[in-house]
Image (tube, grey):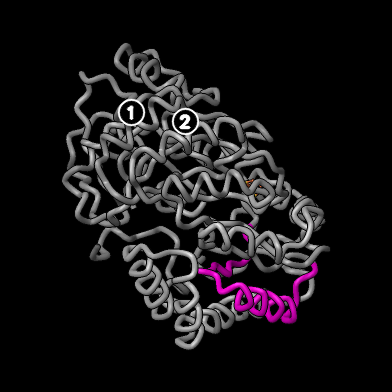
Amino acid sequence: MEPITIAVLRRLTPPRFECVFYDDRIEAVDFATDADIIAITVETYTAKRAYAIADRFRKMGKLVVMGGYHITMLPEDAKPHADIIVRGNAEGVWAGLLADIEADSYRPEYVGEARMDYGLPDRSIYQDKMDKYLPISLVEIGRGCHHNCEFCSIYSYFKCQYIHRSIEDIIAEIKLCKGKVYFFVDDSIFSDKAFAKELFAEVAKLDIIWVTQVTLDIAQDEELLLLMKKSGCELILIGFESIDPDNLKQMNKAWSVKLGERDELVERIHRCGISIYASFVFGFDFDNEQSFKNCLEFCKKHQFFVTAYNHLLAFPGTGTYDRFAKEGRLLDDKWWLQEGYTFGTISYRPKLLTPSELSALCRRYKKYFFGFMSIFERGRTLKTRTDRASIVRAYWLANLLLHFEVDKRYGIPLGGNLDEVRK
Ligand code: SF4
């Protein structure tokens, strides 16, 4: 998908700076570049790779700036690899930081407040790569979420604060993109319900299709669901995480049980014509193999559009990380830098399963869900929710791709010596 953060950074960069962008996911980084400043955004999963790139550039005398969630949560991790780190949101500090570099008076650390007044992202910085990205335009509506899940980095940074852009900017950006399908990349798009309703009423005038991420409590407001559907919403990602009440209680998500009958809420969303990408996480303290069976049954019962069965990750800065560290359950304090760490590796000791059992079960149950019979059965019910050919096509493409790709991601190393890998 297009890296919208980079377009936002370009927008925040004064025009006198010439910018070139390399997307390490799809192309080789040009280490022979004559750039003076190297800016890298870092997530926990990309930290190892980002540090390797940063070290190489710094050896060549380049000035390296790093920011992103991982840096915000764990600045000490990045400091040996960067000349400057940016914690928090870049909006308020980026232009000043660049001016400080020009004046040779920069500080080693900048802290940006949470704000979203960046206007319209400047996508010209990756126009030459658009044919390599999915034909979906990413648009940011807001940041933050009104919940407080123990394992969540969003909560760790924003607490329960939610900030959003202006409706004028959002609509102007959608019109500029000229695409048909949009992903509103929020964590919880309806954290401010009145704002969300106002926004969806405006989006309804644009004749677009959009998808987003929400929490199950959205189903309590049928008016909102109908407005979403009317404005082009076809698919929502819901982080169920678990269907076990004890797990939900432990992760501070017990509210999703208290909402009432989970089945009824799911059916209400489906009745409004919106499909669900159901996301689950395994490896919480009450998970055993039966949890996988129960979850698969729940998923088949509701014929979800697509699902994710991921294992729990203890991201630094979260309550889960701190709890596991206190309980002595982390297998490596800095698992993201661990030699040989690959996708699918469990970095802590689950309570009722071994790490390898947990990894194997996630893989096995993904395969069950994406089996041909399951894809076929779920595909038949899709027509009760939508008659849009593009969504039906997306369903078959996504499910068949996931059927064949379940095994592919496992074993892929995180960072390190990837320059020679053909992209
Ligand atoms: S509902 Fe989602 S975004 Fe909100 S705190 Fe929980 S995991 Fe994070």
Query: Can you identify the residue that label 2 sits on?
Result: 85
**Looking at this view, is 94 or 405 the one in front?**
405
164 drawn magenta: no
Query: In the rendering, at what x and y percent does residue 222 appear?
Result: 63, 49
Q: Position of residue 390 (x, y in %)?
A: 32, 63
Amino acid beneath label 2:
Ile
Task: Give the quadrant of residue 421.
Answer: bottom left
Image quadrant for the C terminus?
bottom left
Q: How packed is label 2: few (under 14 Cα within 10 Å), some, or many (20 or more)? A: many
User: Between 239 and 325, which is closer to the camera in this rendering?
Assistant: 239
- Seen at 42% across and 35% down, the residue is 66
- Of circles 1 and 2, the one toward us is 1
Report the disc number at residue 17. none
Distance between mark 1 and mark 2 Cα atoms: 24 Å
Write the start and end of the magenta stretch as one range. Answer: 286-313
Q: Are marks 1 and 2 in contact (CB under 8 Å)?
A: no
In the rendering, which numbered label is found on residue 120?
A: 1
Q: Would residue 312 be counted in the magenta stretch?
A: yes
Measuring 58% from the left and 62% from the top, which residue is drawn there? 271
